[in-house]
Image: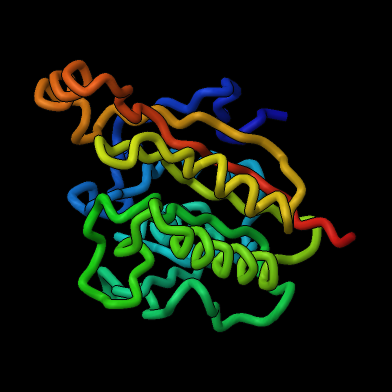
Amino acid sequence: MKNNRPKLETTTLWDFPTQNYGDRPHGDNKFNGVTPAFVIWNLLQRYTKEGDLVVDPMCGSGTTIDVAKELNRRVIGYDIAPYRDDIIQNDARKIPLKDNSVDFVFIDSPYSNNIKYSDHPMDIGKISCEKEEFFDELEKVAKEIYRILKPQKVMAWLIGDHWRKKSGFIPVGFKIYSILEKYFKPVDVIAVSRHNQTSNTPFWHERAKRYNFYLRGFKYLIIMQKVIK
């Protein structure tokens, strides 16, 4: 019998320079902080099946919705400032779903206040990661994800690190990993290379040399499982 299952990436580094794959759009590549569609595609192929309920609490331009529908998954996308009509307005710190009701959660959250996501006053992306408040608020999101996720099911959190001249390096990815480990069992951590980023320009290359810092060329994809203790 012919195996028609899509071929999955098997390396430890996912390197997807484009937002879309195939001939369909996924989200909006002009959106600030847009999520690479093929990352979500890989996750859904690995950890979900047709008919499963997928939730994205910070849906951005709707990439998760587009990919999930294409793969015949049920999907709910929330955002504090909806970008389009099929995204439900909601704060990720209080998700309006029942306990143990979701098969998979994906989230691509802010990692500081370096990108303007919206004008909404409650947007977590308005808080600097230099403040402990930033991590306190994201922990509230993590608790909600744990609450709605079914036992033994998996979530994935895409997050980057932070460097600024005044604050120096802040290991946001490690801090989020430490928060998630309070609630979930680690499954994997993937380095997602970021080619189409604003820092990959001569201007930022020159600044990196002048001020002696590394360009943030990747994000962490932290994959965790809900295990009832």
Q: Which residue lies furthest to the left in this view?
A: 203
Question: Which residue shows up at 40% across the image and 53% down it?
Answer: 129
Question: Which residue shows up at 76% across the image and 48% down it?
Answer: 185
| Near-viewer residue (148 or 6) | 148
> In the image, residue 136 lies at what x, y percent?
53, 64
Classify 217 as above or below 58.
above
Q: Residue furthest top?
A: 209
| Near-viewer residue (150 or 176) | 176
| Near-viewer residue (70 or 47) | 47
The mark total stands at 0
Classify 16 as above or below 103.
above
Q: Which colour scheme is used?
A: rainbow
Classify 74 as above or below 27.
below
> In the image, residue 115 lies at what x, y percent?
24, 53
Answer with left or right where residue 36 lies relative to residue 151: left
Report the quarter where the N terminus lies: top right
Q: Residue furthest front?
A: 166
| Near-viewer residue (53 or 97) | 97
Question: Which residue shows up at 30% across the image and 60% down it?
Answer: 61
Asked whether the viewer can see residue 49, the reply is yes
Asked whether the viewer can see residue 86, the reply is no
Answer with left or right where residue 182 lies relative to residue 171: right
> In the image, residue 217 lies at what x, y percent?
35, 27
Q: Which image quadrant is residue 204 in?
A: top left
> In the image, residue 162 lies at what x, y percent?
37, 40
Q: Which image quadrant is residue 118 in?
A: bottom left
Question: Which residue shows up at 34% across the image and 30% down it?
Answer: 216
Report the quarter where the C terminus lies: bottom right
